[in-house]
Image (cartoon, rainbow, N blue to C red):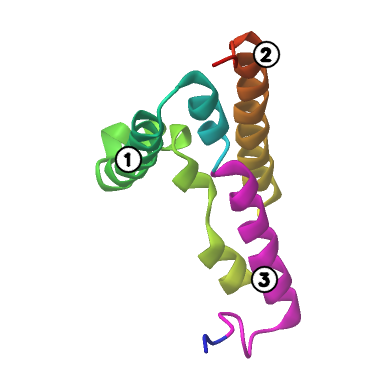
Amino acid sequence: MLDEPTEGLDPLVQEAFFELLADETVAGPGPVPAFSAAGRHRAPVIGATVALGAVGFALNFVALAWSPAAPLRYLSPFHYYTPADALAHGTVPWTSLAVLAAAGLAGTAVAFRLLGRRDLAP
């Protein structure tokens, strides 16, 4: 049986953590439906999705480690997803939450547009 990850924390901190987790669930897969709608085979879609996540992570890492690249951190979703801050301070960074939600909605909108143009007949 798995332990509750926020067991023993203040209820406000728990709420902030789960709000951020819910938003990452919306924003993280934002590009996935767009890639899925654009591709016809699973392997390239999965590869593109994993590559996008790896590039985003690397971009954030380089931006944090190398000061000349610091402005690039805003291009990575990992810059905006900070559940540790919510746990430490008990507040939700609403600006980051809005950016992640916008990214998720944009990916979903692109997917609907691509699917509308795609011929789904066999």
Q: Are marks 1 and 3 in contact (CB under 8 Å)?
A: no
**From this viewpoint, is residue 91 visible?**
no
Q: Secondary structure at mark 1?
A: helix
* Label disc, if present, on residue 78 of the rendered structure: none
Q: Nearer the viewer, residue 36 or 82?
A: 36
Residue 118 placement: quadrant: top right
96 relative position to 94: left or right: left
Q: Nearer the viewer, residue 81 or 25?
A: 25
- Real-space Cα separation, disc 1 to disc 2, in angstroms: 37 Å
Q: Which residue is mark 1?
A: 63
Q: Which residue is mark 3?
A: 90
Mark in front: 3 vs 2: 2
- Name which residue type carries label 1: Ala
Which numbered disc, 3 or 2, marks the residue that appears first in the sequence? 3
Question: Residue, x 67% and y 56% (percent of image)?
Answer: 22
Residue 77 to residue 93: above or below: above
Let me know if residue 120 is in the magenta part.
Answer: no
Residue 44 to residue 88: above or below: above
- The image shows residue 111 at horizontal and vertical percentages of 61, 23
- Real-space Cα separation, disc 1 to disc 3, in angstroms: 26 Å
Residue 15 to residue 113: above or below: below
